[in-house]
Structures are given as C-alpha cells and as structure tokens.
Amino acid sequence: MVLHPCYGLYVWPSAPVLAQYVWYNREMLTGKVVLEVGAGVALPGIVAAKVGAEVFLSDTEFLPQCLEHVSENISLNNLDSSKITIIAITWGFFSSQLLSLKPVDVILGSDCFYDTKDFEDILVTVVFLLKQNPIAQFWCAYQERSSDWTIEHLLTKWSLSCEEVPLANFDADSAEIGGSTMPGCHTVHLLVIKLKEFPSVLTTCVKCTEMT
Ligand SMILES: C[S@@+](CC[C@H](N)C(=O)[O-])C[C@H]1O[C@@H](n2cnc3c(N)ncnc32)[C@H](O)[C@@H]1O
C-alpha cells in the first residue's frame, strides 16, 4: 500500500536531488521563508530548516497519515519547533491555511508531478504563492516517468519561466547522493520556476539553463 505514489511515507528518488540543491544553496536560505508542498517525509524541507530557514511543511489534508509522519520526522531530526510548522495544503484548493500563510521566498516540491491530472493544480497553487512574493522561486525535482508528459503549455498559460539546473552543477548526477541510493537509475530533473514578469533577485549558486 505505501508504494503508491500518493503516499509520502518514504523518500522518493527526487527528494535527495532536491535536498542536495537546497544544501548547495544553503547560504541564501538562511533566514528565508521556505514552504515545501507535497512534502511526504519532507527531506528537502528538513534540510532547509537545518540550514536556518523558517520552514512550512505541507501535504494534503486528504492523506492525514502523511502529515502525522512529517510531524514524527521533525521530532526525530531535533528541529527547533519555533522555526518549522506543518500545514495542510492541497494543490488547487484555497484553504484558510493557504490564504493565511505569510509570503514565502522559496517553494520546494519533490516528485509532485507524478499524475498529469494534478499538474495544473500544482502550478495554480504555486502561482498564487509566487504572486504573494513575486521574487520567490519554485524549486522542483521532477522524476521523468513518461516522455509524453509536459508542463510546457501550463508554464505558458500561467506566465511562468522555467530553468533546468544540470544535476552536475550541484553534484547530483550520480546514483547515490549523500549516502542515499534512492536516485539510482531514475531520471530526475531539477527545475527553477518563477513568474515570468518578475525576474528573481534571489541568486542561486548553481547555473541554470533557460527553457521557457
Ligand atoms: C510521490 S510522493 C513525494 C513525496 C516527497 N515529496 C518525496 O519526494 O519523497 C507525492 C506527495 O504528494 C502528496 N500529494 C498527493 N496529492 C496531493 C495533493 N492533491 N495536494 C498536495 N499534496 C499531495 C502525497 O501525499 C505525497 O506526499
């Protein structure tokens, strides 16, 4: 049952890749507000908290066991509970928790694009958050499951720019990252998505390749 991709009860192959990107950009994250969506066990968000960001970890309210699991992971990692908060955010839903969230600087998403029916809902939620803080960025690790799947038309529709960061730029082009063999032979991409009309002033330490 826990092998279904809806479940965030273990670390998916994209998560060590995104966590590594967070680590490589740790200097710019200190003191920043970071939200992880579809967090599951929340490896990238927990790394962001460890490097000094104020972190909100979110998953859907419709899978409460994921939110409970996030809570256990926070305890296991001895995180300062004043700097890390768990909230329920379901992609495409405008809950009171989403509406009352403070502006975020960086949104993290690891392996959220795994079901095409959710692709636009994820971006609608991201666009809502980026509009609260137009210089914010969405850092997203995407596992390629089908060459037919694309978010390109949605990026255009929602006026988003997208840059791919080559994995070699942050030493994530290997089957093993930080002692985890999860990336294995899976093809994972690291994307940085922003509002098109607001080029970000946040400077990441690794170079990107513009796609749209
Ligand atoms: C493939 S898992 C990835 C989990 C984790 N980010 C990782 O990479 O290890 C997908 C995650 O998205 C969450 N999720 C599924 N549908 C969602 C929705 N509609 N809104 C928000 N989160 C959702 C699941 O609970 C799960 O944690």
Image: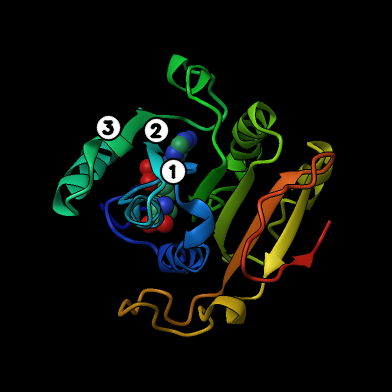
Which residue is the site of mark 3?
64
Q: Is mark 2 within 8 Å of ligand 1?
A: yes
Above or below, 86 relative to 11: above
Mark 1 lies on a secondary structure that is loop
Q: Is mark 3 within 8 Å of ligand 1?
A: no
Which residue is the site of mark 2?
60
The residue at the point 79 percent across, 50 percent down is: 161
**Disc nearer the start of the sequence (1/2):** 1
Residue 2 falls left or right of residue 53:
left
Ligand number 1: quarter of image = top left
**Disc nearer the start of the sequence (3/1):** 1
**Amino acid, disc 3:** Pro
**Amino acid, disc 2:** Thr
x, y percent for residue 167? 59, 76
Q: Nearer the viewer, residue 191 or 93?
A: 191
Quadrant occupied by the C terminus: bottom right
**Amino acid, disc 1:** Gly
Q: Is mark 1 within 8 Å of ligand 1?
A: yes
Is mark 3 in CB contact (under 8 Å) with mark 1? no
Task: Give neighbour class at mark 1: few <14, some 14-19, many 20+ (Cα, 10 Å).
Answer: many
Q: How many marks?
A: 3
In terms of image quadrants, where is residue 126? top right
x, y percent for residue 205? 62, 67
Tell me the distance, in whole angstroms, between the alpha carbons under discs 3 and 2: 7 Å
Which residue is the site of mark 1?
38
